[in-house]
Amino acid sequence: MSGAPSLPTFFQQKVVVGVGDLASSNNTNVVISTFALGSCVGIVVYDSVAKVGGLIHIMLPDSSLSKEKAAKQPAMFADTGIPLLFRELQGLQADRSRIKAFVAGGASVISGSDMFKIGERNIAAVKQFVTAYQIKVVKADVGGVNNRTVHLNVATGEVALKTPMGASKFSLA
């Protein structure tokens, strides 16, 4: 039957990560997505042996801006969210030495002068944590002025990236 979904896609579950949130999964029927990464930075991580993936949508680089907000929504900040993501991955049997990552976002989406440089500061904070955690970043699409949408297929490690300029796919497996 033309146009009918295949059996694997029929049972596929979509998990949407909002701004300042994260998700991780070892369910191979799951696709984890986040939409419209502007100055925010998204980190997609995948362990191909354990078939564990995760995604965080970081809004700000440093939780010292609001300790109360960080306590309620730690994924909003790079310094509290990234450690939380890796604790969740470890709980799902991911091994940090096998994890590969993709980083996207950090755009300057405000017209004119962006005096706060949130995108740049988010990118710098993420680089600091990726280096400290010794995570292999296989691809990055950061900076510029365009927003990005990202999808991770937990079964395959395939990442789909969409921008106003087009779409691409690649694997973290």
Image (spheres, rainbow, N blue to C red):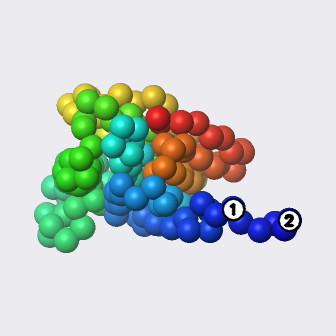
Q: Position of residue 162 (x, y in %)?
A: 63, 49
Identify the element where label 2 is drawn. Answer: loop
The residue closer to the viewer here, 131 or 55, is: 55
Q: Amino acid type of disc 2?
A: Ser
Tell me the quarter of the image containing the N terminus: bottom right
Q: Position of residue 16 (x, y in %)?
A: 47, 66
Query: Is 34 located above or below residue 82 in the figure?
Result: below
The residue closer to the viewer here, 100 or 149, is: 100
Label 2: few (<14), some (14–19) or many (≥20) C-alpha neighbours in 10 Å: few
Label 1: few (<14), some (14–19) or many (≥20) C-alpha neighbours in 10 Å: few
Q: Name the residue tied to disc 1.
A: 6
Query: Is 8 located above or below residue 130 in the figure?
Result: below
Residue at 27% over, 43% down: 94
Residue at 46% over, 66% down: 15
Q: Position of residue 36 (x, y in %)?
A: 54, 58
Whether tag 1 and tag 2 are in contact, CB under 8 A, the answer is no
The tag on residue 59 is none
Identify the element where label 1 is drawn. Answer: loop
Residue 112: in sight, yes or no?
Answer: no
Residue 50: in sight, yes or no?
Answer: yes
Residue at 30% over, 60% down: 76
Q: Is residue 64 left or right of residue 30?
A: left
Residue at 25% over, 36% down: 96
The residue positioned farthest toward the right in the image shown = 2
Alpha-carbon span between mark 1 and mark 2: 10 Å
The residue closer to the viewer here, 77 or 136, is: 136
Give the quarter of the image for residue 124. Answer: top left
Q: Count the numbered circles shown.
A: 2
Q: Amino acid type of disc 1?
A: Ser
Q: Name the residue tied to disc 2.
A: 2
Q: Position of residue 141 (x, y in %)?
A: 52, 37
